[in-house]
Amino acid sequence: MNAMEMPLGPLMVGLPSTELTQRDRELLLHPNVGGVILFDRNYHDHEQLGELNRAIHALRRPHLLIAVDHEGGRVQRFLNGFSRIPPMRSLGDLYDNDSAQALKLAETIGWLTATELGAAGVDLNFSPVLDLDHGCCEVIGNRALHSDFQVVAELGRAQMRGMKQAGMQAVGKHFPGHGEVKRDTHHEIVTDPRPWADIETQDMAVFERMIHYGLPAIMMSHVIYLDVDPEPASLSKRWIDQILWHTLGFEGAIFSDDMFMQGVADLVTDIAQCCIQALEAGSDMVLLCNDPSRIERCVEQLAFRTRPSSLIRLSRLHGSPAYRDQSFKRDERWRQAQVQLKQFNGEPQLPF
């Protein structure tokens, strides 16, 4: 089958299983679709994942972006056949004792995850997490690198550098910061009552530094920051257009988080209209992760054409991996990364 020439649409969608059905292919050929987000339900082993991603990429030109949340710790979608990555907070703990070693390990982890994902055909890892660990947000918790914005920015920069060396762009999340709220936007509407000055000088300061370091993409938070805008940040022109673009000077791609999360879904009756609001606020691509029938309805109902500027930003995110199969295991850097991880995790050293 010849790939269909078609610009990327504004929706990134989830798929139900480990291989493409005809129904999936029809969905992915819709002009409103521009990417696929993968979960553990889409994974059996490295070989199967590579076949799935090759099938997705073969459908269109330019090929659909394939993304995953593969942070480490409790948010690592692919386990069997992939290196087990520790929770990011452990890097922050190491930084407190040995900053140089922590930065070296953060870069190694960035390179390692991007190498393994890229070899299986994944374009993007929604990482690093740039939220601060304020000690009160369970959904973030040890996914956060540290409580100090300067430490988070330096570790995030090292991780981003490692990812780039492996041909993958970083996506920092969740702008402007999800770490201060106790509740979870997956399940309910969440508000952050802090004054603007606190957000600006702490949580947002991480993103400001990372933008200065060249962060190529950002994922928006669904939290409502009451002192700034009554809308969730992901739907807010003030947050995206005025603050992220104009105040911080960000020039990269912007993703929403999943629009089926209750933090935004409970505010609207029409998810397609909610997607349009996020896109009109300035997002380049909107995620629809679960529930195939709702995804299909939204894809059909959406009336929005991707902006030319969005197409340019998104085109920079296609992966350029050094390896397209598991031959990376012969790379001395991969072997040394395994040693570093085992030493860090306190595991016995085994021969390869």
Image: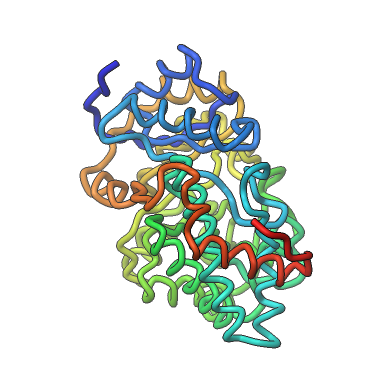
Task: Check the picture and name the quadrant holding the C terminus.
Answer: bottom right
x%, y% of residue 346? 78, 69
Tally of numbered discs: 0
Point 36% across, 54% down: residue:
253
Quarter assignment of residue 291: top right
Point 39% across, 49% down: residue:
283
Task: Check the picture and name the quadrant holding the N terminus.
Answer: top left
Q: Is residue 270 left or right of residue 133?
A: left
In the rendered image, the residue lying farthest to the front is 351
x%, y% of residue 285? 40, 43
x%, y% of residue 252? 33, 59
Q: In terms of depth relative to the viewer, which is nearer, 43 or 153?
A: 43
Q: Is residue 199 left or right of residue 168?
A: right
In the rendered image, the residue lying farthest to the top is 22
x%, y% of residue 339? 64, 67
Q: Is residue 196 visible?
A: no
Point 39% across, 66% down: residue:
215
155 shown above or below 278: below
Q: Is residue 13 visible?
A: yes
Q: In terms of depth relative to the viewer, which is nearer, 210 or 295?
A: 210
Q: In terms of depth relative to the viewer, which is nearer, 31 or 53?
A: 53
Q: In terms of depth relative to the viewer, which is nearer, 304 or 79?
A: 79
Point 57% across, 86% down: residue:
100
